[in-house]
Image (tube, rainbow, N blue to C red):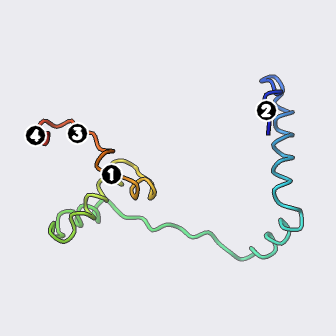
């Protein structure tokens, strides 16, 4: 969609164009079908891991068997990473600021 003709002073025009675009994505029959068939469905809640569970896992599990999982857990939590960010993480993405570990 070309938005070059819109100005900042015309938010109603932008809103109308957005509403029109959204309305064209799903026909009215599809929306009715989805509403009717989703009755009684509820959203699943994610399981929550507590700070104590994390500390117990990091301190009690053996590094020889679980080091990779521990590192992924630490990166995931301290970096607030999403799943795809953790999956695509490589050594090249890590900046080392500690002189102790530099080559």
Picture quarter containing residue 101? Answer: top left
The mark found on residue 56 in the picture is none
**Residue named by callout 2:** 3
Which quadrant would the C terminus be assigned to in this image? top left
Classify mark 1: helix, strand or loop. Answer: loop
Labels 3 and 2: the sequence-earlier one: 2
Classify mark 3: helix, strand or loop. Answer: loop
- Label 2 CA crowd tier, 10 Å (few <14, some 14–19, many 20+): few
Asked if marks 3 and 4 touch (Cβ < 8 Å), the reply is: no
- Label 3 CA crowd tier, 10 Å (few <14, some 14–19, many 20+): few
Apparent side of residue 75 relative to residue 22 in the rendered image (left or right): left
Q: Identify the residue at image location x=79%, y=28%.
A: 4
**Residue named by callout 4:** 100
- Label 4 CA crowd tier, 10 Å (few <14, some 14–19, many 20+): few
Q: Identify the residue at image location x=28%, y=62%.
A: 54
Q: Identify the residue at image location x=16%, y=37%.
A: 98
Q: CA distance from mark 3 to mark 2?
A: 43 Å
Residue 29: where, in percent of width, then height? 89, 68
Apparent side of residue 100 relative to residue 94 in the rendered image (left or right): left
Q: CA distance from mark 3 to mark 4?
A: 10 Å
Residue 55: where, in percent of width, then height? 24, 61
The mark found on residue 96 in the picture is 3
């Amino acid at each position: 969609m070309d938005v070059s003709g819109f100005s900042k002073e015309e938010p109603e025009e932008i809103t109308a164009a957005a509403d029109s675009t959204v309305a064209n994505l799903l026909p009215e029959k599809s929306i009715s079908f989805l509403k009717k068939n989703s009755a009684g469905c509820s959203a699943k809640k994610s399981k929550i891991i507590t700070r104590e569970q994390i500390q117990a896992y990091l301190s009690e599990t053996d590094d020889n068997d679980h080091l990779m999982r521990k590192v992924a857990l630490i990166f995931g939590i301290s970096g607030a990473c999403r799943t795809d960010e953790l999956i695509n993480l490589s050594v090249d993405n890590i900046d080392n600021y500690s002189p102790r570990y530099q080559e």
